[in-house]
Image (spheres, helix red, strand yellow):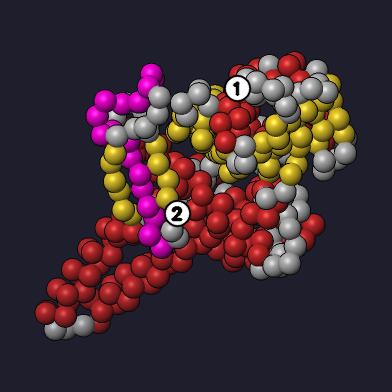
Amino acid sequence: MQKNLSDLKKEYEDLSQKLLDPKIISDKKQYQEISKRFFLLQKIIEKQEKLNKIEKNIKESQEIIEIEKDPELINLAKEEIEKLSKEKESIQKELNEIKNNDKKKSSSDNIIIEIRAGAGGEEAALFVKDLFEMYKNFALKKGLSFNLISAHPTDLGGFKEIICEVKGKKAGEYFQFESGVHRVQRIPETEKAGRIHTSTVSVAVLPSPPKDIDIPINPNDLKIETFRASGPGGQYVNRRDSAVRITHIPSGIVVSSQNARTQIANRENAMKILKARLYQQILEKEQKKVEKERKTQIGKAMRAEKIRTYNFPQNRITDHRIKKSWGNIEDIFEGNLDRILNDFQK
């Protein structure tokens, strides 16, 4: 990045206006790309302004040394220069790292996927597991890294909640249409009378904060608790109090992780989830400046809407946003989501 400060500020102002454009806000991918650049510039400008101020203060102290005759004032000026020089070196190093990261910008688009059981009790929890497996199969077919962060299992083999991280090229693009409420209609394994049940599961796709964007978290704002993992047993339950719950006091966000074997690993996973949710709040805050009355795909209101129905007796999946249906549910749940994705991109 070879632009001077005034050029960076001009670009920053231009991007801030674009982030208020309803057309850009409605395009989730474009909005995220612009917001990433916006926050990157914000960080660079902040560092550069600090650097400029330090250089100005160093120059003023040097002038004092040149014109002042009082030895005490000269010594104070020298001490100030030494202090400012160390601060300048530290900030310059940080600024160079930010700029280098910008030049080496990866094509990865890492995301956090949260899948939660809604209405339907155990059947909804079982469908959480089915969606998780479907997304996992799809991600692996696309060559993406798919890592389980947190899971809260139920007695019948389902999950109240599963949170996972997907890393790799176009991860966000592949999963950008999954946020919302997914409805399933099928005969549960526990249903003896053969009746069809309707259950719901909510899916939230959150962009992981890019490495060049700092999500400030004050350790004093965190309440960290440990507890024993709950569940039916097996790989998801630890014998010690290794599960971690973190409460971010200013926002009220509560996250937890119990899948890893150690407290340290669970704490790292919980912090990933917290940073993703805080980053999501930053994006939503920008949107709400002009979208107070308007629902958007990335907004909370969209997640409350039914976006897709999985009708197993009729072997049909219907997406209510584009009014399109697909057959062969089993094939899609093997991870073959390209048919759905392609129809969204037409």
Residue 152 picture quarter: top left
Q: Is residue 226 magenta?
A: no
Query: In the image, which disc is placed on residue 190?
Result: 1
In percent of width and height, residue 73 lies at 16, 80
In percent of width and height, residue 99 lies at 50, 47
Amino acid found under the numbered disc labelled 2: Ile
Marks 2 and 1 close (CB-CB < 8 Å):
no
In percent of width and height, residue 35 lies at 62, 53
Query: In the image, which disc is placed on residue 253?
Result: 2
- Give whichever of 190, 319 is nearer the camera: 190
Q: In terms of secondary structure, where does tag 1 sit? A: loop
Q: Residue at the location (67% across, 50% down)?
A: 304
- Give whichever of 195, 156 is nearer the camera: 195
Q: In terms of secondary structure, where does tag 2 sit? A: strand
In percent of width and height, residue 278 lies at 49, 53
Q: Is residue 205 visible?
A: no
Q: Which is closer to the viewer, label 2 or label 1?
A: 1
Q: Identify whether 268 is placed above or below 134.
A: below
Q: Badge 2, how many Cα within 10 Å: few under 14, some, many 20+?
A: few
Q: Is residue 238 magenta?
A: yes
Q: Residue at the location (34% across, 73% down)?
A: 57
Amino acid found under the numbered disc labelled 1: Thr
Quadrant that contains the C terminus = top right
The mark nearer the N terminus, 2 or 1, is 1
Q: Is residue 262 visible?
A: yes
Q: Which residues are magenta?
A: 233-250
Give the Cα distance between marks 2 and 1.
35 Å
- Give whichever of 324, 43 is nearer the camera: 324
